[in-house]
Image (cartoon, rainbow, N blue to C red):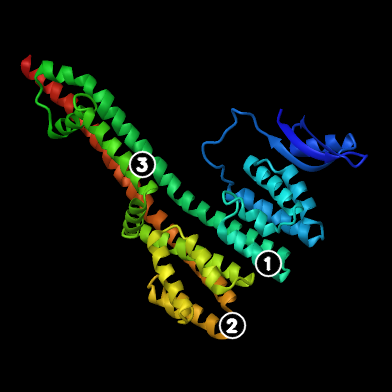
Amino acid sequence: MPKFAYSAINIEGLNVEGDTKAASIGDARAHLLSQDLYPTKLAEKRGLLQFELTKEKVKKKELMHFTRQLAVFVRAGIPITTALETIGDETQDTALRRAITAMIEELRNGGTLSMAAAKHTQVFPNYYVGILHSAELTGRLDETLDSLSAYLNREIETRSKVVSALSYPGVVMVMAVVTVVILAGYVLPKFKPLFAELNADLPLPTRMLLAVASLFTDLIYLPITFFACVIGLAIWMMKTAQGQRFKDKAVLKIPVIKGIIEYAILERFCRILGAMVRAGVPLPDGMETTTEATANTVYRERLEVAREEMLRGSGFSGPLAATNLFPGAAKQMFKVGEETGTLDEQLAAASEYFDSELEVRIKRFTTMFEPIMIIGVGLMVGFVAVALVSAMYGVLSGVKDGA
């Protein structure tokens, strides 16, 4: 059972410190109150062996639920500390619960909600903190939290669409590769001594398959070296700046995939920037935060150049159009929004446009990729089957000729 350290005030007004065991932080608070102790600080106490190698990240779905619940509490006029205590008691995510506990302490020490959230970057992205800060200045915290929860929900749905589109072809490809590896690497080598003993004249497909099978027996060091190189390349692309740039440039050159990635990035850019502008964030600050939140380095570099041009007084739509990242319809929306003062509405419209186009491109990719994958898998398995069957016929023919 978890142990919680607390600081509390007793009925005599004295400060008391200690720890207590409870199933959850809510049960610990209720237990203290039942003993006439009013907690001012309550946090889970971790043992020496309970260390973290990396920071825990909170899933977007958990952050979305937290944001939606907080919006309801704020709209109802409930103090933020009380709202956070209630949400923290109910959440099942350990990292989020710890962040909420620390935020409550920060608020009680005179901090603001955005200041408290900024100290937990593994939970709250930069754009989230920036929007919160602007909402506190404008007094529209409940509306802003609703907008944030809607954005997070939309991002979850978009990612789910992409994953769903790729999951079925991916599973089929993995199963096909596993089947071929088992047949070529385990089944066929069992027949190799028999072929040699009978001195059978093997057909070309069988000889080709035997050559592949030798990679898993006599030449096993070759596939091991190959997979080691692939793993090393993947680590280089994920962990180094040069590798990430290489990967980001490469994926933007893959047909069909390029369109999906581009529209996913642009949809996210417009949605985040639109939410920040709507919350009252100054446009240069919003551009800075949105650019930092862009995952692709190629887009991030071009958007940074556009931001620098904005700071020089070149406006908003012109520098973005010069990046050549946005289609003509989006450029027109940006120009209209800049000239009419409805930039937040136009950014929202652009994000909806990119979202609908993204869905069309995902469906097009799925429609095209699934039959190609099925045909490819059929050819692979068919080739193995033909190689095995033709080898059996070759052996039988050799036996008959010998008889």
* Residue linked to disc 2: 341
Label 1: element kind: helix
* Residue linked to disc 1: 135
Say above or below: 232 vs 307: above
Separation of residues labelled 1 and 2 (CA atoms): 19 Å
Do we see residue 355 in this rendering?
Answer: no
- Answer with mark 1 or mark 2, whichever residue precedes in sequence: 1
Q: Amino acid at mark 1?
A: Ala
Q: Are marks 2 and 3 in contact (CB under 8 Å)?
A: no
- Answer with mark 1 or mark 3, whichever residue precedes in sequence: 1
Q: Residue at the left extreme?
A: 402
Q: Residue at the right extreme?
A: 12
Quadrant for the C terminus, please: top left
Label 3: element kind: helix
Which numbered mark, 1 or 3, is in the foreground of this view? 1
Q: Are marks 1 and 3 in contact (CB under 8 Å)?
A: no
Which of 241 and 341 lies nearest the eye of the viewer? 241
Label 2: element kind: loop
Is 198 left, or right, of 27 in this rendering? left
* Residue linked to disc 3: 173
Is 385 left, or right, of 126 in this rendering? left
